[in-house]
Image: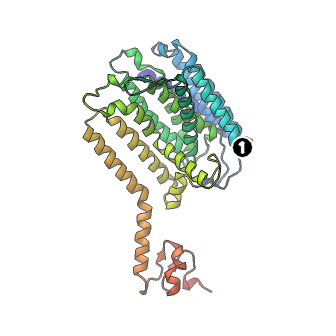
Amino acid sequence: MIFYILVGGASALVTFLLALAILKLSMRYRLYPKIRERDVHSRPTPRLGGVAMFIGVLVGFAIASQLDRFHLVFVNPRPVLALLGAAAMIVLIGVADDIWDLDWVTKLAGQILAAGLLVWQGVQLTTLPIGGVTIVPSTTGLILTVLAVVLVMNAVNFIDGLDGLVAGVAIIANGVFFVYTYILSNGVGESEYFNLASLITTVLVGACLGFLPLNWHPAKLFMGDAGALLVGLLMVASAISVTGSVDPGALDSGRQLLPAFIPILLPFAVLLVPLLDFALAVIRRLRAGKSPFSADRMHLHHRLLDMGHSHLHAVLIFYAWTAVASIGCLLFMLVPLEWAVGFLAVGFALSAWFTLAPLTRRKAGEASAQRARGAEASGVARLDPLDAASEFDAAPDDSIVTDASPSPKETP
């Protein structure tokens, strides 16, 4: 474990120091875009943090390559070089998009090329992780891998709309996935603890930890498309590298049935939030006759803000959903079935309650204002200004005011 801490710590430190340097250079030379209509921040902010994260990842891999414990990862360097090459392509595309705002066709083509590079060098699904069933023909594995890489990269990029959101979600999800890969290696030799999937999650968590202090609300630096696409690429690469080769028969599936499905379920669990947002966005835009890659202000994080959550509360809610889904899925391998189900039930119930709390408070406030109708309720504000255009217009009462109109005392 100490070797993973060393590699992750180096990635975090390099990312943090370079992010500081990029922030200073960006502010000095005004390397930041104008604020867009869909943005939630109110001041121009540099968006090149993904460059610092990428270099932090490179340093993490470079240090691991010099450690004997990781020698199995680099015995065949082709997958590692392909991963880093694909990451470089994605970062370049992301930086270009952050500066020149590329069209979606160009971005999609670059993402497919990066995914193709991974597949070409062997980072692809070769088996279905239920009993080691081989995918036939091999072309199917290639297509599924490219689709998965493009899907996850865009899904992670879609939720990159609040300070600290992507970095925090990635830390939680990849922390859980690291534990999963570590458990899979238990009992097959100490050297197997040091595998590509665990190394990817380690350097990614380190890069996100190093970047998060500058990205916490109010953010001084954004990771931009370069950083969000990089996070998505590394997350899906780690999932593919372990999911496509694990044989769940080695797990204690005699005690539980679900562990045999964990290799399929866990990648979806750790990506629950971005995949859900991505699916809703695609459906929403296609129904409106728009491109699924067109921008709008109706993502899940926008809706949480519109519901009345603060910026911090919205981010913490995303953290909660991610933690409950990923940890709960992992618990099926560690504890009795009923305990894992109980954790998921309680966790999702609490997360749902905190998510919907502003609506509950709004309804309570509206009910209180309506009960006060006809009585002296000076200073009572109805939470929904639309009520002023409904039944209260038919029977006006000057003692009841709304946020959309001045009180009688303020009327000249």
Q: Amino acid at mark 1?
A: Asp
Q: Vertically, is 194 above or below 336?
A: above
**Mark 1 crowd level (few <14, some 14–19, many ≥20, 10 Å Cα):** few
Q: Provide the secondary structure element on which disc 1 rests.
A: loop
Q: Vertically, is 290 above or below 75?
A: below
The x and y percentages for residue 161 are 57, 48
Residue for badge 1: 101
The x and y percentages for residue 245 are 44, 22
The x and y percentages for residue 395 are 49, 87
Q: Is residue 226 left or right of residue 144?
A: right
Q: Is residue 53 left or right of residue 134?
A: right
The x and y percentages for residue 340 are 30, 40
- The C terminus sits in image quarter: bottom right
- The N terminus sits in image quarter: top left
Residue 299 visible, this orientation: yes
Q: Vertically, is 126 above or below 265?
A: above
Q: Is residue 270 left or right of residue 102?
A: left
Q: Using the image as rendered, state which of residue 313 and residue 269 is in the foreground.
A: 269
Counting labels gives 1
Query: What residue appears at the point 49 percent right and 61 percent down from the top-left corner?
Result: 308
Q: Using the image as rendered, state which of residue 103 and residue 316 is in the foreground.
A: 103
What colouring does the structure picture have? rainbow
Q: Residue furthest front?
A: 137
Query: What residue appears at the point 41 percent right and 60 percent down from the top-left corner?
Result: 357
